[in-house]
Image (spheres, rainbow, N blue to C red):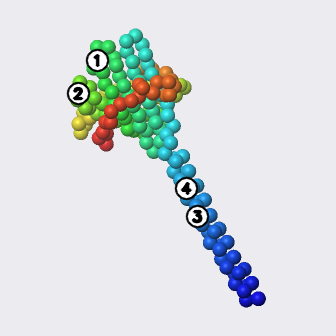
Amino acid sequence: MKHIFWCVALGAFILFLLSCGAKKSQHQTRGSDEIAKVMIPESGCYASLTGGDSIWLKVEVFPNVVTGVLKYNISGKDKNTGTFYGKLYGDTLIADYSFYSEGRQSVRQVAFLIKDGSAVEGYGDIQEQNGKIVFNNVSSIDFSKGFNLQKISCADHDEQFRVEAVSHKR
């Protein structure tokens, strides 16, 4: 009788240990899935291709930050390519754009109004502040005269959004 009692008790203990281990691994898996979901950005790509001019914009929206790639190739101006780091305020992106032009790195603030399948670049009065060009007043940026980029497939134009690493000054 004692033997049966100990067998049942041992069996119950083993089941208890297995159930604790199963719960722990399920929790770890679910936690990993949550982390993966948070880290996958929502991407959107935009382009303006008129005449010999081209502008390429890739926006990757994370929960608290927006990053991406921006390339300008405007006739009569220096070509520049770089990355940006900023935030969305409603449908307005304000970001620091770190780019190379004529072999020199620069940083300037950019603004895009992103809605209805387009991204329109905004312009406003600017000043130099701590080594970068910034808008004097973000609330007075004018989006009526900026380049109008249309939404495109990121996958179909992947090669346009490749750049060498550019560090951001925040």
**Callouts 1 and 2 close, C-beta under 8 Å:** no
Question: Is tag 3's residue or tag 4's residue first in the polypeptide sequence?
Answer: 3
* Residue at 35%, 22% in the rendered image: 72
Q: Amino acid at mark 2?
A: Gly
Q: Which mark is residue 126?
A: none
- The residue that mark 4 highlights is 31
Circle 1 sits on which residue?
77
Q: Which amino acid, by three-letter code, is at mark 4?
A: Gly
Helix, strand, or loop for circle 1?
loop
| Viewer-closest of 94 and 35 | 35
Residue plotted at (28% across, 33% down) = 107
Q: Position of residue 30 (x, y in %)?
A: 58, 55
Q: Which mark is residue 24?
A: 3
Q: Nearer the viewer, mark 2 or mark 3?
A: 3
Q: Secondary structure at mark 3?
A: helix
Percent coordinates x, y for residue 99 in the rendering: 30, 30
Q: Is residue 137 visible?
A: no
Residue located beneath label 2 in the image: 103
First in sequence, mark 2 or 3: give its number. Answer: 3
